[in-house]
Image (tube, rainbow, N blue to C red):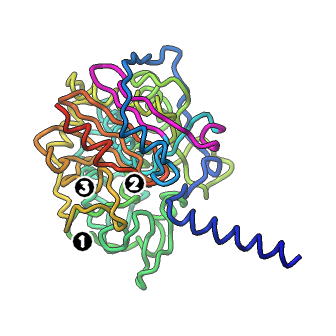
């Protein structure tokens, strides 16, 4: 019996030490109700002209260390690199992979559609007609302030002061509310948010700003929100399989379909992420209404004013760590490539979508964490002429 206990303890220690080296999925796909956008019968079909890339293959073969499990490079209107080794839990869930904070950019993308469809006036509209945020620092602010993460909320949430994007802080500095779990109305009516005043407009990356944008859009669009999502992803991006936006956990069981319960976390399979990225690129390059929205948030991007660009606290890189500017929930101005118009979507664990509008090149990376060599398999590819 003692031997069995010792073996179990040994396994726990080994597993814990190994697992601690990697980031992890904080939220379960099955824990949330979701907005489902079903795939199109007329889904976009990719052409391929595949090459063997030794750098990507090496990182993928060493996935226990690097965390990489999927890589796609699209250029010349074809998929050129297509490598993957998906974990069993992703395969069993129809290939769906979490966006984490890449979903913040997709919330902005949907907001652009809401503006173009006439539900929201423009990015400078003031949030003064939405009772949910009454009495908080967000009341009366311009939408662009939230899109650019400059809403002056740094005293209560955000990476600027608290090293977390989703935990509201109380006066003692302790995280007390996870904004990705509670409905937006509960958050805004909390004692921490009520009677708050905005601080100076500095870049402060956080999840509350994004969830506020998403739920403001839900409020403005009303009963046609699902129709809008179908327009964005099914009709225009021409996804093949269902994709999902999550909803918060703590909410009314009697109201599963409606209400301000949006949460930015998004799920899609590897090819549908690429289809969505291509639709973003096509809008930009064809100067559509949504394309003009994307160009407007690019023009109004702001400096991150980071102290250094040496990676995250563990020295790992991704597009958020290596860009100087931020605009409309997208990362812009990659170091060394700031003259090129390149948009970056970045998520926890090293999820990256990079869209080079000028070169018409897209890179989609899905991973468990940031231990892959980002500069070699992403930045190096972007620098290629």
- Please tell me whether mark 1 sits on a helix, a strand or a loop: loop
Q: Is residue 41 magenta?
A: no
Q: Position of residue 268 (x, y in %)?
A: 51, 36
Task: Identify the residue at the far right of this view.
Answer: 1
Q: Is residue 72 magenta?
A: yes
Residues 258 and 159: in front is: 159
Query: Label 1 belongs to which residue?
Result: 199
93 left or right of 346 in image: right
Q: Residue at x 53, y 38 (%)?
A: 85
- N-terminal of the pair, mark 3 or mark 1, is 3
- Please tell me whether mark 3 sits on a helix, a strand or a loop: helix
Task: Identify the residue at the far left of this view.
Answer: 339
Q: Is residue 349 visible?
A: yes
Q: Is residue 211 visible?
A: no
Query: Label 3 belongs to which residue?
Result: 145
Query: Label 2 belongs to which residue?
Result: 212
Q: CA distance from mark 3 to mark 1?
A: 12 Å
152 left or right of 9 in image: left
């Amino acid at each position: 019996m003692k031997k069995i206990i010792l073996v179990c303890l040994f396994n726990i220690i080994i597993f814990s030490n190994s697992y601690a080296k990697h980031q992890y999925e904080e939220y379960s796909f099955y824990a949330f109700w979701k907005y489902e956008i079903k795939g199109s019968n007329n889904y976009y079909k990719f052409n391929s002209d595949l090459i063997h890339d030794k750098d990507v293959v090496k990182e993928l073969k060493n996935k226990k260390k690097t965390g990489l499990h999927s890589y796609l490079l699209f250029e010349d209107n074809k998929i050129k690199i297509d490598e993957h080794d998906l974990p069993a839990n992703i395969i069993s869930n129809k290939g769906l992979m979490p966006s984490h904070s890449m979903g913040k950019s997709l919330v902005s993308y949907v907001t652009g559609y809401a503006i173009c469809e006439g539900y929201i006036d423009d990015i400078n509209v003031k949030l003064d007609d939405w009772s949910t945020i009454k009495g908080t620092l967000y009341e009366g602010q311009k939408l662009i302030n939230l899109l650019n993460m400059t809403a002056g909320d740094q005293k209560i949430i955000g990476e600027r002061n608290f090293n977390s994007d989703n935990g509201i802080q109380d006066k003692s500095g302790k995280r007390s509310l996870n904004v990705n779990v509670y409905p937006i109305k509960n958050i805004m009516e909390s004692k921490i948010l009520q009677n708050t005043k905005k601080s100076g407009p500095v870049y402060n990356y956080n999840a509350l700003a994004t969830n506020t944008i998403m739920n403001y859009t839900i409020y403005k669009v009303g009963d046609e929100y699902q129709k809008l999502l179908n327009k964005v992803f099914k009709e225009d991006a021409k996804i093949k399989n269902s994709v999902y936006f999550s909803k918060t956990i703590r909410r009314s069981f009697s109201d599963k379909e409606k209400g301000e319960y949006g949460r930015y976390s998004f799920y899609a399979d590897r090819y549908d992420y690429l289809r969505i990225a291509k639709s973003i690129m096509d809008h930009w390059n064809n100067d559509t209404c949504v394309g003009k929205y994307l160009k407007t948030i690019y023009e109004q991007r702001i400096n991150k004013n980071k102290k250094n660009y040496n990676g995250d606290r563990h020295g790992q890189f991704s597009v958020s760590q290596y860009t100087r500017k931020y605009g409309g929930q997208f990362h812009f101005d990659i170091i060394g490539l700031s003259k090129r118009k390149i948009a970056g979507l970045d998520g926890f664990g090293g999820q990256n979508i990079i869209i080079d509008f000028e070169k018409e090149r897209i890179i989609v990376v899905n991973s468990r964490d940031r231990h892959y060599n980002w500069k070699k398999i992403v930045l190096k590819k972007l620098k290629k002429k």
